[in-house]
Amino acid sequence: MQNKALARAVLHANSWLVELDERSVASVVDITTLKERLGGPLRDAGTDPAQVIDELVNDTKDGHLGCAGGRFFAWVIGGGLESALAADWLVSAWDQNAALSACGPAVSVVEEVAGEWLKELLDLPREASFGFTTGCQLAHFTSLAAARHALLRDLDWNVEERGLFQAPSLSVITNQQKHDSVDRAVRYLGMGSQSIIRAETTSEGQITTKGLESALSQAEGRAIVVLNAADLNVGACDQFSELIPIAHDAGAWVHIDGAFGLFARASRTKKHFLNGVEAADSWATDGHKWLNVPFDCGIAIVRDKEAHQAAMTISASYISASSKARDQIDWSPEWSRRARGVPVYAALKELGKSGVEQLVDRCCDFCTQLVSRIGDLPNAQIVSYPALNQGLLRFTKRGASDAENDDYTNEVIGKINATGEAFFSGTNWQGLRAMRVSVVNWRTSQEDVDRTVSAVKSILT
Ligand SMILES: *Cc1c(COP(=O)(O)O)cnc(C)c1O
């Protein structure tokens, strides 16, 4: 029997995607209206499945952001490649519980291959283990759990059995521009945000050698050093070749926050920013950002397989381990889970190595164009010229104070977003308000860039 709801969803999804260029990038309906449309008491009687889908589309109409399209430059969001989106739908239709190979033999192999391909693409140690998570947040959690295991194992403390009460201390050293997901991972792991030492960092967003050395000497017990493979404001990468050997000499575990930036390894002209990153002990990245698979998908990659598995695995009598099959439950924090590695497999197959390289290069080029062309407009100032795909702009009026220009920058962002032509978000950088320009979507085209510059020009002139 045909699934009519699914057929309706295909129609709605296709028209959503086709109409992205004509629709406002910003949501144009307020939350109260959405609540009125969608809310009310749960009815006693059910609804026809296809009608549920039609109503869902109607009731959420105009309340979505156009982040699947090419003129969305806020946060670091990414879109969905055609095959990745379609593969994601199949994952739901197949509905395998991808915790165990026994519950989903084929998807377990697809995820295994996707992980191997990723290590090759990102040029990370081929013998490293990996796990697919919901995002980089949980990839940090997974990697730092492995770090915690390994550092305490060296001190004869089995953290999985004995926990952290009375355990030897651990410290976490980060860049001052760390992402807050690192704090949350540290909190979830029972180490507490007070165990974080923020190392001295340059105004360009890189930890200094002295800063790392001094943080290592302040650290209580063994340290986990978290370095940035592109921070989200300016895309700064730490100097891995210098810093990682220093951290290792001090017995530290080095973890990399490479949510989007690790993918620059796929570009011959950009990968030098990440020289030496392969010497780290663990890496966290996202499928749903620069690789353009739909939400949600992150990846944890860990050099010390044994520590990774010890931190994540369970053993239960009804689980039959087979030496040939890979059980994802050994490598990620979830139990029941969707096979979120399948869209990664599709995306990598659709693009190939050269396609990922072109995607990365294109996004970096468009980011540079947006920052320099908008930066040339009246009242616009370039705060950070992009090295990769992240740049910063600020809007200032002659004679105005910093605080007034902070307000003016917010006002300009609001006005651009209100045109529906493009969408940006703001940030604080070195104490001042700035507009972020983040380009990670496979759909962004030269036309999108031109259209965005015109929209900003119409606001500023
Ligand atoms: C987005 C991001 C994260 C968090 O990733 P999620 O996928 O949202 O969990 C961490 N670090 C950086 C640099 C990011 O850009």
Image: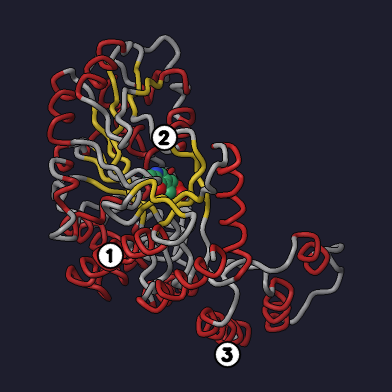
Q: CA distance from mark 1 to mark 2?
A: 29 Å
**Element assignment for label 2:** helix
Against 118, is 190 above or below? above
Is 58 left or right of 231, judged from the image as shown? right
Residue at the (83%, 65%) spot, across then down: 36
Give the structural element (helix, strand or loop) at label 3.
Answer: loop
Most foreground residue, 62 or 450: 450
Residue mark closest to the camera, 3 vs 2: 2
- Disc 2 C-beta below 8 A from ligand 1: yes
Circles 3 and 1: CB distance less than 8 Å?
Answer: no
**Residue on which the image places disc 3:** 2
Q: Is residue 58 visible?
A: yes
Q: At label 1, which amino acid type do we have?
A: Asp
Q: Which residue is mark 1?
A: 365
Along the viewing direction, whichever of 133 and 361 lies nearer the viewer: 361
Tell me which amino acid carries mark 2.
Val
In the depicted structure, whether residue 212 falls above or below residue 39: above
The one nearer the camera, 296 or 26, is 26
Select label 1 or label 2 by which is in front. Answer: 1
Dot placed on the residue nearer the N-terminal end, 3 or 2? 3
Residue drawn at x 35%, y 18% is 171
Q: Position of residue 272 (x, y in %)?
A: 14, 49
**Amino acid at pointer 3:** Gln
- Position of residue 125 in the picture relative to residue 37 (left or right): left
Q: Identify the residue position indicated by label 2 in the image.
A: 182
Residue at figure coordinates x 34%, y 58% from the top left: 101
* Corner quadrant of residue 283: top left
Q: Secondary structure at mark 1?
A: helix
245 vs 389, left or right, is left
The numbered mark, 1 or 2, whose residue comes first in the sequence reads 2
